[in-house]
Image (cartoon, coloured by chain):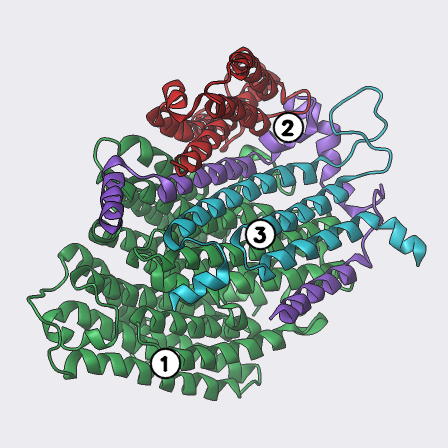
Amino acid sequence: MIEFILAKYNYWIYITLMMIGFYAMIAKPNLIKKIIGMNIFQTAVFLFYISIAKVKGGTAPIEWEKAVQYDNPLPHVLILTAIVVSVSTTAVALALIIKIYKAYGTIEEDKILEMNK
Amino acid sequence: MSISQHFPVFVILLPLISAVLIPILSRAKKIYGWYISSAATFFSFMISVSLLRTVLDKGEISYWLGNWEPPWGIEYVVDYLSGFVLVVISFIIFVITLYSRNSVDKEIPEDKVVPFYSIYMLFVAGLLGMIVTGDIFNLYVFIEISSLAGYALIAVGRKRDALIASYNYLILGTIAATFILLGIGYLYMMTGTLNMADLRERLPALYNTTVIRTAFAFFSVGLSLKIALFPLHIWLPNAYTHAPSVIAALQAATATKVGVYAMIRIMFTVFKPHFILEVVPVARLFLVLSAVAIIAGSLLAFGQKDIRRVLAYSSIGQIGYIVMGIALANRLSIIGSLIHILNHALMKGGLFLVVGAVVYKTGITDIDGFKGLGKKMPFSMAAFTICALSMVGIPLTAGFVSKWYLALGALQAGKWIMVPVILISSLLTAIYFWRIIDNIYFEGHEVEGKIDDAPPGMLVPTFALAFCCILFGIVASIPVNITGLAAEMLVGG
Amino acid sequence: MKNNIIIQIITRLLFPFIQLFGFYVIMHGESGPGGGFQGGVILGASVILYVIVFGIDEGRKLISEKTNDILNCTGVLIYGGVGLLCIIAGGKYLEYNILPLGSVHFASHMGMLGIEIGVGVTVSAVMITLFFETARQGK
Amino acid sequence: MKTTYLFVVLITGIALAYGTIDMPNFGDPQAPANHHVAPRYIEKTHEETGVDNMVTSVLASYRGYDTFGETTVIFTAGICVILLLRETRDNKKKNRRKKGVRS
């Protein structure tokens, strides 16, 4: 049991991070905090992808005469794309929040919902 | 070496490159944005038709980007399924783009027209990319392009509620996309590949591992959020209500349909029907959810006063129909689902376009405000009535064909309980549309002032959609034949 | 920070070096860590630093709104253009090897460099756009 | 309401933990992810694309189209922010006038 947990410790960390982010994303009433949660949530997935890529004893996947083994380059590439997507989403979300703040004067979700009634 | 071999990639490149050119070229004149968009969507549609014809003549097309053979490189696949959906979606997009000129003039502030069209084209490129791709990570990238563009397009609605609707959509959309990304990671981890066809071959040996089951669960939840399947639909009504009319039509007619297409791809191409029917019987769960969605969507549409909200809730019900066909997973029900993708895109697109025309002329969106419009805007209202009849599923309209095939599929699968569900929901649909049509034709003249019908730039596209609703009701054999081939490919004989 | 002479001078000194480093990272992507995205962000950061120190109006003199908008699009156009060149040269989309530039490896090198530059231009321009558009809201 | 959210998050966590059971161990060289597609990227990068950095070769060449999509995403974000936040001078004047009326 202990071995099972230790052998996969990266995955446990990513699951914890993901739950934290997910909770903040859906439960926090503050719009900015939701975005912070979103970033944690997405970063957790990045950690997962990078964990797939790791090979014991491997070095960064750049050709090097002393290298015995390389890490898997493909997840790195995928996650570069996903990071860019995450940055873009955050940018659009923050722009929306600025507009919301200008229109409503607050960024607390419950107050905004009251105003909309 | 003819140019036609590059068509699969040109379908996406046309809108994408025009999205980039619009901010540069329309500095001189705002209207260039619309010209470029119309031209690009028109050629995209033409190329799609030509692709579908090639597929029907010669079979599946596979295009290797960068000439790296799959699974190492990215592959574009046009087969019966994607060819059909591609033609449907690019046609609707072309029609809506034609329509957009007047509506955008009215509803979008003048200084935002240029970036609006640019994002509009990016949205289109994202949707078309999702259809053609045969690589599961590429699918994610295009999902993100279309959804990012979608958030911004909804947020330009006139009222401030549009902002908060868009924000909520962004949060839920990001959860959905991240779940899909996670599912992709799980599949990659166990198989070492990202190509859909390759995954199909390598997965069956792994069906019993917990990793693959979790991956499937995350795909299901993520895609259900994207298509607004019933308990996960909360973002949809507000988004459709507060978005500009053109965008509401575009989102309702195309975005959810492409989401459903992605779902079909995951369930029947990446996984095999055997997986959802026997290994992990999620098909049953989806069947229940779809039945609930069909009934609940129709019931919720009842209580609404805003016409756009009625249409939004009715969309939730219609998504239920499509998912029902997927969950039954036999040849007839898949035909029903695919034809319903076509029909619902036509009908809902048409209805939202009429609403856009009413907003353009009067600014009214309340159902009560429709009183007496039948005399003031006779052509628009005629189109509305045709589309509404098709929604109900009156014989000789397109809506009847898909419901017929869905019912046949349900009987074939032995799930006869779904037949009354379809009938009850049709009845409910008839009742809530009757309320509106009654207002339009038989109530007094409440609208004051001189209102004439919408300009031809809006009427012609609306009628094109309404005409197709009738056309495909009478000449149903064309879509039935094509989707029949697609269904055979997906679930076999 | 408009009146702080030390920060102003240091920024002026650092500004070209940060940009040089940005270009280096873009060009160096083929043989070491780096690439278009990372280098583009560094380039964008140099302008953002400049604007933070000298103010938005000075920053607009450095890079006007019009140039910025056009640069946004240029990057994607370069990328798409390289792909189309490959089609014109008779290959598939983004098949660099086919480009008529002598050896296959050299063509592939140039193709990748082209798209890295495209990515870098778009990323840096978008970073600057994001900063300007949000910074202006405070006014 | 908070308990509902907590419940949803816990369900997600349990699903993820369930999925972890059959996963290959962290850093396992025998993991399937390292065997089907990846070896070609590692072994043939130099020969086929002429660059040393495998991440770059996969990013720009083998999966170059994804990167095109990535560039488009960032471009989309830029245009989205312009669409949402940019106000021309005329609009600003109007806004100021409105504010003036209110005060």
The residue that mark 1 highlights is: B303
Is residue C48 among what the camera can see? yes
- Nearest the camera: B160 or A40? B160
Picture coordinates of residue D70 (x, y %)?
53, 38
Q: Nearer the viewer, mark 1 or mark 3?
A: 3
Which of the labelled discs sits on residue D56, or is there none?
Answer: 2
Name chain A's colour.
Answer: cyan
| Chain containing mark 2 | D
The chain under label 1 reads B
Q: Image point 58% across, 30% down: which residue?
A: D60
Tint of chain C:
red
Determine whether the residue tagged by mark 2 lies in a helix, strand or loop.
Answer: helix
Tell me, yes or no, if residue B84 can be seen here.
no
Q: CA distance from mark 1 to mark 2?
A: 56 Å
Report the disc number at residue A33. Answer: 3
The residue type indicated by label 3 comes to: Lys
What quarter of the picture does the C terminus of chain B occupy? Answer: bottom right
* SS for dot 3: helix
Image spot of residue C26 (x, y percent): 58, 21
Which one of the lettered chains is coloured green? B
Q: Are marks 1 and 3 on the same chain?
A: no
- Check disc 1 and give the amino acid type: Gly
